[in-house]
Amino acid sequence: MNVRDKIYDRLIEVSNPERYIGNEYNIIKKDWDKDKIKVLTAFPDVYEIGMSHLGLKIIYHLLNKEDNIICERTYSPWPDLEKLLRNEKLPIFSLESGRSVDEFDILAFTLQYEMSYTNILTILDLAGLSFYSSDRGENDPLVIGGGSIVSNIEPVALFFDLIFIGEAENHIVEIINKYNKLKNNGLTKNEILTRLSDIPGVYVPSLYNIKYTDNGTIKSINSKDNIKPKIKRQLVSNLDESFYPEDFLVPYMDIVHDRATVEVSRGCTKGCRFCSAGITYRPVRERKKDTLLKQIDNILDSTGYDEISLTSLSTVDHTEIQDLVQKLTAKYEKDNVSVSLSSLRVDKFSVELAKEVQKVRKTGLTFAPEAGTERLRKVINKGVSEKNLYEACEAAFNEGWSTVKLYFMIGLPTETNEDLQGIVDMVNKVLEIGNEIRKDNKKSMKPIRINVSVSTFIPKASTPFQWEPMVDKVDLIEKIKFLRNKLNKKGINFSWNDENLSLLESIFSRGDRRLSDVLITAWEKGARFDGWGDFFDINTWLESFRENNINPDFYLRRRDKDEILPWDHIDLGLNPKFLLNEYNKALKNENTSDCRFANCKGCNICINLDVDLDIIGNDYNVYKS
Amino acid sequence: MFIRAEYEKKDQLKYISHLELMNTFRRSFRRAKLPVKYSQGYNPHIIFSMSQPLPVGMIGFQEYFDLELNQRIAFDLIKTEVNKKLPSGLKIKEIIEIHEKEKSLQAVVNTAIYQYEMEFDKVQKDKDKLLKNFLNKEKIEITRFRRNKDDRKIDLAPMIHDGKIVDDDIWEFIISTGSSGNVRPQEVLRALNIETKGLIKKVPLVKIKRIGLFVRKDNKLYKPINSEVLKKEVKEN
């Protein structure tokens, strides 16, 4: 039954009603055949964020390619629609057919960041489902999850019947078909989940028992009898041949990434020690230039977009990038198609590449030196020198860019005021370089603007800094104040994260299952869209911790090296010593080079997950004048 | 070559904004591989202009846009190719060629017909009389609320040209739209609400449809694609 039809005319009362209408060009609407398996994907954030997410686009088209599967979508309703649905006692609906969740066999969440956890609860509640897997019945849809934060999913693990660890392309259809078969054979939910847990990458949280010591740390993580003790991350070994959609949905709304996208490579081995994605997507696998060219052609044809984004964790490192970009600009300039790069390396090569792609439309340039001194950049293994940055910015200003954006982090391990002063000095120097070039420039150039965006370092699970404490709140406020006072020259624009939000994210990043109740309490008190500053209230959260007798500081503290961590049963394929080695090297200010272009660093992911670095060219891309 | 197209925007698409509608058209032109003309400069975009925006929530049956093409193409071909590439809810109904110096749609379109799903406070017997009294008034004063500006009193009477009862609760009004006198469709209802002391209720925008946009000349209504109101010297296709 179409639930949406009942309130169609009342959508005029909510903000941005076009979020809920579906009907995008290329939408897939299949006949609601009773023999088909119905999957509803859910993104726990608002439409314009969820529609920009590449992983979900891949899953949507991958599942709909199967004749026996119908895959539809839903996103978090904005609080005004949530209120309307509650007032009218209506459930959340899918965008394709307007049906409620109880008409689907599977509800599949994608999990991208901790601050969207309360939105999962909103969707479950508006679907009429209990939060905990153990409270849901035999007739409820299977609730599954997957995505980039599965390196530590524990705070929400018990809400899910099943979580997939890693890249799902090769297994998701198998899981769905097997579930359907077992369900049709009359097995109970518990029997089905036990059977599904045999599939590689499938994590059934209820089959793992966590015991705690008296001081609150984890005593043991035990799987039930005959259940694998660890869940091994799955991945696509050959990205070039792996499925990629070409008939993307074209939204009406101006979504966050409103352009055609190709995934040039997956994984990054630069080895930044703060970075979670750098571990969870290893190793690097590149798509071939010719494959990409073909995909881009088809995507532009089917969507009508006039911008193509080359996306990956480090696009400029793709070994065929220069050739690809030259071919693209030669081919599409006359059609007014512009090319954008999702991430730039801090060097002159990147600027040259940016210059090449921005022949059609000029957009901003962003560089991420991440830390203010050579020493601290060695600690975090960000292999960027001041010279790299100044050369890159000089090249950018000379090419006519007047605005650059610089990303830094504060609260990093071993950080001192000297490192913060380093940020100030670098920014001032970049401004100076810009102003010099502007002064000498005969052509009129807009005033130089340096947008400095400073985010708070958060120790993440399965990174070399997973044992580090979160920066103390008082110190964090001092650090922000230090920068705010010193980054005060005309032309510098400084922005930073809300310190309370950073602390909350940090708690959940390394949290465990005892935080599930805190989430529910906070949700009941009205917590929604926490990542959006406008709704976030730290007091709601502090009360929720208190009411559940949980001390948030417990999750912010330094972890012992021999402590069992809440995510120890998730096997990312890492050599157990690798993270510790990297941590020790960090404290000795030692760099680790990228294994793409140097020898193996012993993370052992290639061996443990039976996959190879898949690099098309041989060389590190350098600027040749 | 310059073309002018008549299209309809209905069903779910009543919820997309004017800017979103323009983007949707631009992308459909590209999907249809129409040889559209681009502007010059840093941020080239398709040269394309539209008639008065529809408010979000309202369906429109006779809406218009002008577009410049780099080469001559048969109208039927443009229509079928673009329609194939439009999302459901949008459809081009007719295309004509216009003179390159033709006045813009926003400059010539001055009148619109709106259709209202009326709601009454209680059963009304003599609706004809209600309407007649309203149309015969010499002055219909209401307060116009303006964003970031002071409220202002305006007289709707000279801008409401006619009205009729189509089918009991379905009423239509012909009113001015555009730069030389503009009535917002809901203002007519607000005035009726005041004049009838609440007998006629205000309804949300989704209960109002725009039947069409017109050029009003000598008390007659012409579509902006009618040769009567266009420059003459355009070549036949």
Image: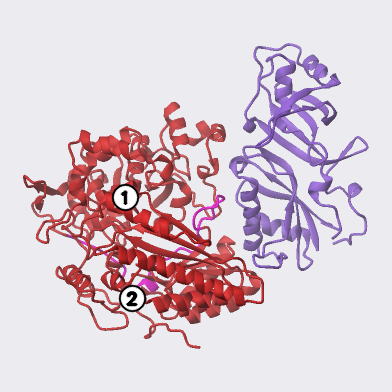
Task: Residue A114: give its label.
Answer: 1
Badge 1 sits on which subunit?
A: A
Asked whether A75 falls inside the magenta stretch, the response is no
Place residue A371 in its image quadrant: bottom left
Between A223 and A255, the residue placed more toward the observer is A255
Q: Position of residue A172 (x, y in %)?
A: 31, 57
Quadrant showing the N terminus of chain A: top left
Q: Which chain is purple?
A: B
- Who's the residue at 28% across and 62% down the image? A412
In the depicted structure, whether residue B120 falls above or below residue A551: above
In the depicted structure, whether residue B201 falls above or below residue A236: above
Range drawn in magenta: A231-257
Between B176 and A527, the residue placed more toward the observer is A527
Assess disc 2: are there few (<14), some (14-19) or many (≥20) residues with their C-alpha within 10 Å of its C-alpha: some
The answer to whether marks 1 and 2 sit on the same chain is yes
Q: Position of residue B109 (x, y in %)?
A: 81, 44
